[in-house]
Structure formats: structure tokens, C-alpha cells
Image: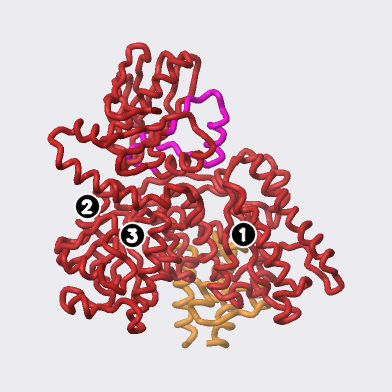
Chain colours: A orange, B red
Amino acid sequence: MNEEEIYDRLNEVFRDVFDDDTIEVDELTTADDIDDWDSLEHINLIAAVEQEFGIKFRMGEVSTMKDVGEMVEIIMSRV
Amino acid sequence: MKELEYPFDSAYIMKKRRSLKKSLLADGAARVKKKIAVLGGSTTNDIVSIMELFLLNCGIEPSFYQSEYAQYWQDAMFPDETLSAFAPDIVFIHTTNRNITAYPSVSDSRDDVNVLLDTEFARFEQMWQSVSERFKCPIIQNNFEMPLYRIMGNRDSFDHRGRERFISRLNEKFYDYADTHDNFYINDINYISAQYGLKSWSDPSYWNMYKYALCFEAIPELAFNTANIVKSVFGKNKKAIALDLDNTLWGGVVGDDGVEHIQIGQETGVAQSYYEFQTYLKAQRELGVLLTVCSKNDEENALAGLRHPEGVLRPEDFAVIKANWENKDRNIIETAAALNILPDSIVFVDDNPAERAIVSAQVAGVSVPEINSVEEYIRVLDRSGFFDITTFSDDDLKRNEMYKANAQRAMQQAAFGNYTDYLLSLDMKAEICDFTPMYLQRITQLTNKSNQFNVTTKRYTAAEMEAVFNDDGYIRLYGKLIDKFGDNGVVSVVIGRKDNDVLHMDLWIMSCRVLKREMEFAMLDTLIDKCREQGIKTIMGYYYPTAKNKMVKELYGTFGFAKISEDEEGSVWQLDVDGYEKKCSVIAIND
């Protein structure tokens, strides 16, 4: 799976979780860019991403991920 | 909504919850509003938002109060203003083994452990007492799931110092409490977590990262199980199972293969699977669930199959048998009419996906579980929570007999030229009295599940009904009807609120199984007697329309009330007690 495919699938996950079809994520997207992305929704998002790519984030990764770019890097290294 | 019926896709529900909620709210379904206080010993946000979906899906629109993180005990013991003002209709205490404050240590004697156990239990018991005194509403309390690890290995299960043993004993104390207190229900997360798989359920990373006491993916399982209790408390359970025959109750097609070749009994593994399914259904029937047949078959063949000597169910176990070549949606609607229940109280069980699709598309509200193959039938039906029992009355045990007696009455009726002669021939006797503790449970149950013969559709929790029972400001009547075919049990409830010499009717309900028996007139006659005794001069009746109660739109009119006003909200009726003359001549009242 290349980076572009990952972004495409990730974008769908974001749209589903936040129920907003206008979302376009890129490597610099952070929680500040999406209104409903708070700490509670973060759990939901992480679970949905794990489900989509069939991976598990490690405990440390979940709390230290700074932006979507870092999330994609981790996904790339697992799939 | 299919997405929210068992077996559901948990990850999908978690991910799509926002859009699911949107489409539920947009479907225009009528829902009762209920306030649920969730007192959590761990994070509850996602549990609440998923519970909301399941409740919306079964006709309940919930609003929630949530404790601040892990403040369940403080909230229950010393509720703050927000919780008090919220005035919950139901309280859900979401605690888990993470909330057990002290476990036995290796040096503890048996007596030490007993003290520890009593202390831990007392902490919970105080909380339940406080909640039930303050809010007078039902309580749902989690039991405890098994521990994730066993320090002593297998010995943990029986040694008095073992955590597993300690949790089991604590659970046992919870059950004793639940078994002896009304309005208190156990949310069996011990069972649900085992079914889900304790290893995943108790994945500690969710506790350590988010303070969730279960894994994220299991939240829909927990929410569904809890919602099933709420649904049952508020009278939203199903009432009947309509069953296909060929490849549903037995293997093979009785019309083609012949009765001697259908698979049922002990001969083969497949036959045994169908036998187990029939056994399961027979047990449901004993608990008061109505069974009916809905099969494309000649009736003769259907009956032959049901009389198979190796089968468990017999033709007489079914309240209605529809074996014909009509479309099944039509048969379901006729079945509902014959039983005087609504189609949305029916669960339709058929192995054929095409029949399932037609019925679920054509009959609004009917539940159509995806049962797949025979070895899954029991699990899918059982886990769907259609019949989660919260109260259990003697009437439940007798229900099938009562419906069958109704069918006999219908046959008798045909033999009489005149309807009054028929009614007189039934030798009807009614017991119509003020509420008594013995019937309070049945009264509440009937009140909460009557939809059609119900002028106000006012619902009462057991605690609210008890408050009415203890208040002199009300005139209350329950009506029990007995005839020569049997005892119908408590079939009607009337509650009027006194305001000087005026009585306002809060509730007038009757079970549809005694329609057209003049039972409503017997209730009215008795009510008028009570009014005269207590100096009531005027009775005010109210009709509030719902999707289901059209049959009583003119009830007060037939009672001789005058219509005072009518608008979209409903109609208001008035009767002078003085001029009233007795209306019921076919039932002996309180002989």
C-alpha cells in the first residue's frame, strides 16, 4: 500500500467518524483543524483507524502522535 | 434499523455513530422520552452515546446525566443539584471489578475475608438505598466481570483469599439483593464479557490510556445489553414469535419430503439441532411469549409436521397457525389482529432471506433477525434481547392458556344468534377493587405495555405506581375478569386524581384480550360507585392520540361523557356523576 492509498483510506475514516464529507486530511492536519476532534473523539478515531488498516497502535504512540503525517508513518511501518 | 440489531458490527457502529443517530432522529418514529442517569466508576462517554442509538432504535428517546469521572458513589450518596434537578427515570450504575476497593490478602483468615466482603457490599447497598429513596426509580447495576489474571491460578476460583472467589461471592450478594428487591436489575456484564471473550474485553490498555473498564470494540455489546433492560422496564419488549416451519422448525420440506422424512428428534445431528431449537421455543412459551406459525404450506401438512412424534412443539402450543399460500407480510398482519397485538410486537423467524426481506419491508416495526443456519438460531434469538425479563408475573405464566381460551370463546360466539346472549353465556365475573400490593406488579406491567386501549398512554415506573397506591388523593381500580373458560387475570386499570369534587382521569387502560366483553362498562359502573361514596360530582376524561390508540378516541363518548373541547393535542370530556345509570348488565361485579 503506498502513501497515497493510505491517505485516501484515512480520509474516509475521518469523514465517517466526524460525519463530515468536506474533510480533507494531509500530513499537517492536527486536532485543531477539525472541530469535533477532542480527546474523547480521539479514542474513537484511533479505534476506527486500527480497524481500517488491521493494525494496533502501541500505547505510547497514541498519546504522542502530533499530526496525521505521524499517524501515516506508523501505519506505513505496520501494513 | 438493521445496523443496530443483533448480530451487529460493533466497529461499524462505533465509527458511524453520528450518521446513525442522524438517520434515527430523521425517521419520524414516535418515541417516549426517558431520563437516564449514568453513574460511572470509569469513563462512560462512548457507552452513553452508543446506548442512545440502541434506545432510539426501540422507541425510546433518552436524555442522559453522566457522573464526573468515577464519581458514581458520591453522586449516589450525595447527589448534587444537577442530578437532583435531572430527576432520572432510571439510574444505571456502571461499575466493574476496577471499582472494588479492597481484595483479600494472603494472610487473611476466612473471617477477615467475610468482613471485607460485607464492607464492600455495604458500600454498594447504601448507594442503592440512597438512590431508591431519593429518586424512586428503577436501578440497573452491573455485576462484576471475572478478573483478568489469577494470582493463584486455578486455586483463585475456590480459595477464600482468591480474587476470583471474592468477585463471585460479591456477585452472589448482588443477586440476593436483586432477587428480593423490586425495581432493581442486574446488568449481567459477567456473562456478556465471557461471551465476548474476557481476554479482549479486559484489555488493560483501554483502562490505562482512557480509563475504560472494557475494550473500545466491546462498548456496543455492553450498551446493547443495558439498553435491553431499559427497553424491558419501559414496556418495549416483543410479545410473540411468528415461526416458519420448513427448515426453521425442522429440516426439510414436509410437503415434498413427507412427514416421515423431515429432520427433527435424535436421529441425526441436524435433527438434534432442530430439536434443541424447538426446546428453546417451548421454554420461551412457558415464560409467556406467544408462538405462532407463519408458513407457506397446506395446513394439513403443517399440522402433520407439528405432530411429528419426535418433535417438542405441538399444534396446541401455537396461539395462531397460519399455514397457507398467502404472502407472509399479510399473514403477519392477520396474526397480529387475531391476537390483538400490534405487528411491531412480533418477531418473525424464517430461514428464507427472501421471505425475511418481504416481511421487514412490508410490516413496519416487525423484528426480523438474520438467523442463518440452524445451529445459530438459538444464539441469535437469545442474544437479540427481544424478551429480556425485568418483571415476571403469574399472568406471564398463564398467557398462552388465556389466548387459547380466547380462541375457544370465538368458536362459541359463532353458535349464538345474539351477542348479548353470548356474553351472558360466558358467566363472567369481575373483581374490581382498589389496588392491592399483590397485584401492583401486574398493574404496572399492564400499564406500561398497553398501547391500543389506552386513552392517555401515561407510563408509570413501579416506584411511581407505588406512590399512587399510597396516596389518598387518587381513586384507583384494577379489574380482573373470570369466565367459564378461565381466569383472564388483571385486564384493566383506572386511575383518577381527585381535585375537590372533580375527578381527573389520568389513566384508563384495558387489555385487548377482553375487548367487546363490556368490561370497560363494568369498570365505569364501579368507578361511579366509588365517586358517589367519596363525594365526587364531576369526572373529567382526557384522550391523547398516539399512533396506536385510535380505538379509544370515542371511549368517553360511549361512556356518556360530553365532549368539552378537541384539538390536535386531544380531547377533553366531562360527566356528571348524578345522572349516571349503570351500563354493564352481563358481568357480575364483586359477587
Residue A19 position (above or below residue B256)? above
Whole-angstrom CA distance, mark 2 to mark 1, is 41 Å
Q: Amino acid at mark 2?
A: Glu
- Residue located beneath label 1 in the image: B142
> Which residues make up the magenta segment?
B450-478
Disc 3 chain ID = B
- Residue located beneath label 2 in the image: B334
Image location (x, y in percent) of residue B343: 29, 52
Q: Residue furthest right?
A: B107
Whole-angstrom CA distance, mark 2 to mark 3, is 14 Å
Q: Look at the image and tell me whether residue A23 can be seen.
A: no
- Residue located beneath label 3 in the image: B241
Q: Are marks 2 and 1 on the same chain?
A: yes
Image location (x, y in percent) of residue B211: 67, 65
Whole-angstrom CA distance, mark 3 to mark 1, is 29 Å
Q: Nearer the viewer, mark 2 or mark 1?
A: 2
Name which quarter of the figure residue B323 lies in: bottom left
